[in-house]
Image (tube, rainbow, N blue to C red):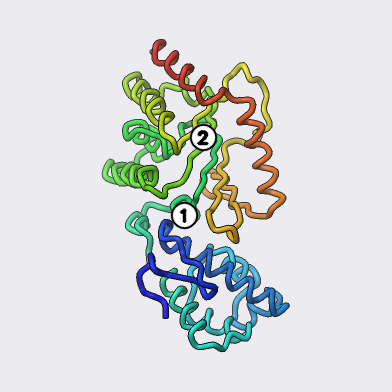
Amino acid sequence: MISARPEAATLPDGRPVQPRGGPTVVRMMLGAQLRRLREARNISREQAGHAIRASTSKICRLELGRTPFKRRDVADLLTLYGVVDSGERETMLALAEQAGTPGWWHQYGDLLPGWFEVYVGLEEAAATIRTYEVQFVHSLLQTEDYARAAIRLRHRGTPESDVDRRVGLRMRRQRLLDQTDGPRVWSVVDESALRRPLGGRAVHRRQIEHLIEAAARPDVTLQILPFRAGGHPAVGGPFTILRFAEPDLPDVVYLEQLSSALYLDKQEDVDDYTAVMNDLSVQAESARDTVTMLRAMLQEL
């Protein structure tokens, strides 16, 4: 029998469910397990969807861990896949219930669109976060005042109390970097983002100082893509690649738009963006030269 506590959860094959990432990790690992069971029985997604009165796209979302599980749906799928052992069924059903437990970000649900809630959960679960930024410093590396200025730009006219909560959410996400098993963050930022005086001179200076401090962390790699590098392959704008410690979970490319986001996990898409990210890392200043460049920026302010 599975323990109800997330830190003790295991899959039927004995592998532990990672505690970091909360319900998002559990959903992803349970979805991957259901996909393996379906494929082992040569059952199509359409057949699986028919068994739980759902569309093929819902089966796809379930297997990717992008949507909550219903205990009844998991039970019906297990029956379809020929899982009859009571212990294995109970383990899977308990995981389905655990996957429905709200993450810490649920308290901000009234502010977060559904498409971004998914990202926060994936970010929480990731082992590596690689990001390219054009207009802003990445959220995980922002100071509170810089974050406030960026949020005010996007949410003009929003009550100050809501701005405070949005800033609080962003700062809460940054606690990832202080966890012993937190992700490695590798951020390539365009020089234009660092030249833009967001929030005024004092906020700008403190943000540059904060980046210098962050660059000294063993779990952070920071590179500036300077103007002198000329053209580069990231013509589509900023993007993030999330990689997970569990080998069965695919990498995810996150593309945020003004009022929605795209999540790409097809191998060819991930490979394409990974190649672009690798090229950017080569064109950008080294981590050491980036710090030198940041210090020079401070002298100019």
Please state which of residues 158 and 91 is positioned toward the viewer in this rendering: 91
Secondary structure beneath disc 1? helix
Q: Image point 66% across, 42% down: which residue?
A: 273
Residue 212 image point, x, y percent: 40, 25
Image quadrant where residue 171 sits = top left
Q: Is residue 180 left or right of residue 245?
A: left
Viewer-nearest residue: 50 or 240: 240
Please, which residue is most extreme toward the top here?
300
- Residue drawn where x is 56% and y is 68% of the image: 31
Q: Is 180 rendered above or below residue 56?
A: above
Distance (Cα) linking label 1 and label 2: 18 Å
Q: Position of residue 272 (x, y in %)?
A: 70, 43
Seen in the picture, residue 116 relative to 34 is either above or below; the reply is above
Q: Residue at x 53, y 65 (%)?
A: 29
Q: Quadrant of residue 295?
A: top left
Whether residue 78 sits left or right of residue 216 in the image: it is: right
Instruction: Report the front residue among 12 and 176.
Output: 12
Foreground pick, 125 / 67? 125
Q: Amino acid at mark 1?
A: Ala
Mark 2 surroundings: few (<14), some (14-19) or many (≥20) residues within 10 A: many
- Mark nearer the N terminus (1 vs 2): 1
Quarter placement of the N terminus: bottom left
For the residue labelled by badge 2, is the local secondary structure a helix, a strand or a loop? Answer: strand
- Residue 133 in percent (x, y) is at 53, 33
Q: Amino acid at mark 2?
A: Ser
User: In the rendered image, which residue does mark 1 sit on?
Assistant: 125
Residue lying furthest front? 14
Tell me which residue sits at (44%, 52%) in the image.
124
Q: Residue 256: image x %, image y %?
A: 54, 45
According to the picture, the residue beneath numbered tag 2 turns out to be: 187
Mark 1 closeness class: few <14, some 14–19, many ≥20 residues within 10 Å: many
Vertical arrangement, residue 10 with respect to residue 299, above or below: below
